[in-house]
Image (cartoon, rainbow, N blue to C red):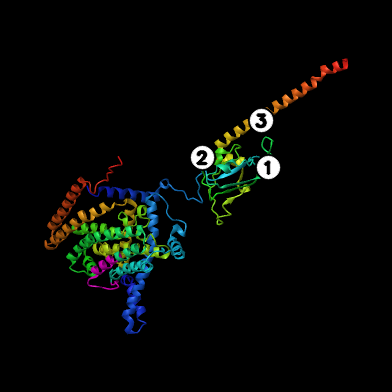
Amino acid sequence: MLGEGIVKGMLETAKNFAGSYVSKERLTTVEYPEQRIPTAENARVFPFLVYDGPDWHAGMRCVACQICEKECPPKCIYIEKSKDKKPDYVGKPQIYPARFDIDISVCMSCQICVEVCPFEAIKMNTEFELATDDRFGGLLLDKQQLAHSNEYYHKIHPTEAAEVDGRLAEEKAKVEAKAKAAAEAAAAKAAAAAAAPKPDAPAAGGD
Amino acid sequence: MAEKLDQIFVLLRDWLVGYLPAAVRPAAGVVLGVIGILCVFPGLFAITTVFERKGLARMQNRLGPNRVGPYGFFQPIADAVKALTKEDVVPFRADTVVHFIAPLVLVVAVFMGFAVLPVGRNMVLVDMDAGLLFFFAMGASTELSIFMAGWSSRNKYSILGAMRAIAQMISYEVPLLLSSITVVMITGSLSLTKIVEAQNQYTGIFPHWYVFTPWGLASFLMFAIAATAETNRSPFDLPEGESELVAGYFTEYSGFKFALFFLAEYLGMLSIAGLGATLFWGGWSAPLSFLNFVPSWIWFFSKDMAAIFVFIWIRGTLPRLRQDQLMNFAWKFLLPFTLLNLVVTALWRFMDGGWLRWVVCTAILAGAYVLMGRSEMRRRRFGPRSYRYAE
C-alpha cells in the first residue's frame, strides 16, 4: 500500500532514537579527545626520521644521500649535507644531514620517501594532531622534531619495524662477516707475508 | 488561579500598559505583543536547532552536540556568536542592494505570519477576520525574497536553488490551501480564533478536534506534506540540496545573513506547524477536557514543538526526492486528493450528524487512497525507485 515504506522507515528511526538512550552498544561513535581508538598498524600520516640508541643526533640513520629529496613528488623535503662525518650503525664514517626539514603543509603522505630510502632512515609516523597556529614555521618540521627513536617505531609499526631490524641486523652481520673475512684475509696475508720471508731468511742467511 | 495562570501574559501586558496614558495604550499593547513574539519564537528556534541536531544524531546512533553547556544545550549561543563574528562576504558581481535586502524581507515576511496565530486563549496579536488568508499571503510572499536571494547572488547554484524553490513552493501552495479550506468550510470562518473556539468543545472528555474526523485527518496529512514542502524541509529540501547545489539560494550568504536565512527557515517551520495545530489539533485547547486547568499557551507550544519533532523525525528518515517525483506528487496525487476531500467535507457538512456520515466519508477517502495508491504504484510513480543503468 502507498505510504507503507514511509511508516516502516519512521518506525526504524524511532527505534534507533529510543534505543540510543537505552543501550550503549548502539552508539557507534567515540568521544574523541577523551576517548581514542588506537590507530591501525599500517596507518600513516607524515614521515619521521629513525635513530638508534639514546642520542638522536648520534644515532640518526640518515646519511643525507638526498634520494628522498629528489624523489619527493611535492618537493617538501629540504636536506643540507654536513661537512664532517660521523660513524653510522656499522661504524663506517658517513655524512649526516646538517639540515633535514619536511614541510608537512606540502607533504601528501605518499610514502615514496620511505620506499626509496636505502638506509631505513625515514618512516611514516601515525601522529595526526599537528594543528598549530603558526601555519608557516609551525608546519616546517626540522630534524630534531622529525627524529624518533627506533623504540617509537617499534611501538607504532611493530611488524614493519621488526622486519627492518632483521634486515639491518643481517646487513650488519654481513658487513661484520665481510670485515672479519677481510680481517682474516688481511691476517692471512700478513701471516703469509710474515711467513713468506721465512724461507728467504735462511736462504739469505744461508748465503 | 488556573484562570490567572492561563491569562498571565495578557494580565502582564495590561498591567504594564496601565502605566501609560490612555491615548497610547492600544499601540503600546501591540508593541508589547510584537516584542513577545520577537522573543519567544527566536528562542524556540534556538531550542529547535539543538533539538534537531541531537534528535537526528540519536536517530543515527550518535550523541550529537555535547560540548557547550550541559548536554550541549548552549550550542545555539556558540552558533550565534560564530555567526555574528564571521566575515560577511558579498560576491563581487552580486546585486548588492537586493543581496542585502533579501534575508531581511524573508525574516519580516515570516514573522508576519505569527501576528494572526492564536498562541493561547485571548493571546493573538491581531484578531483578524481573514486571519487564515493573511497567513497564507505572508507565507507566499517569502517566495519573493527567496528568489531575490537566488537572483542577486549571481551564482548558478543560487539561481538553480531559487528556481527550484519557486517551482516547489508554488506547486505545494495549492494543496496547502485546498487542504486548509476544508476547515473553513466546516467552521464557516477564516478567523483563526474562531477556528480554535469551534474545536474547543468536548464530547465526554474527548475534544472536537478536526483531525479526529475522516476529512480532517485526510486534510491534516496532506497539509503536513504540503507544509513540509513549503518550508523546504527534507524530504522536499531540493532547493537547498547540499549534494547538488551547495546550499541552494543562500549559497552566497555568510555570517549573520546566513543566520537570518536559517532563522527564517525555522520560523517558517514553527509558524506552519502552529497553523497546522490551530487548524486540525485544536490550537490552544486541551486534549482532554479535565486537562483544561493547564494554561492554554502551554498546549499550543507543546503542539508546536511536537510538530517540530515530527519534522525532525521525517528528516531523519526519508531521502531527498527527485524533482520530477516532487512535481508528480504535488499535481497527480495531492491535488486530486485534496479536491476529492473538498467534496467529502461538503458531504460531511450537509449530511446530518450520525454514524452514517462517518461511514460514508471514511469509505470514500480510504477507497480513493487505496485505489490511487495501487494504480500509481503499478505505474511505479510513487513506488520504489528503479535505476535503468545501475543493474
Q: Residue B291: percent from the left, percent from the top?
A: 29, 64
Quick check: A69 above or below B302? above
In the rendered image, the vertical position of residue B352 relative to residue B18, given as above or below: above
Q: Amino acid at mark 2?
A: Asn
- Mark sitting earlier along the chain (2/3): 2
Q: Which mark is residue B391?
A: none
Q: Which of the pair A26/B245 is nearer the observer?
A: B245
Residue A103 among those drawn in magenta = no
Residue type at tag 3: Val
Q: Quadrant location of the C terminus of chain B?
A: top left
Dividing the picture into quadrants, the one containing residue B148 is bottom left
Residue A73 lies, with reference to residue A192, above or below; the image says below
Of mark 3 and mark 1, the one earlier in the sequence is 1
Query: Residue B21: image x %, image y %?
Result: 35, 84
Q: Mark 2 or 3, which is nearer the eye?
A: 3
Question: Which residue is tagged 2?
Answer: A42
Left or right: where B304 falls relative to A150: left
Are discs 3 and 1 located on one and the same chain? yes
Chain designation of label 2: A
Pointer 1: what residue?
Answer: A58
Badge 1: chain ID: A
Q: Label 3 to label 1, Cα distance in Å?
A: 20 Å
Q: What residue does disc 3 label?
A: A175
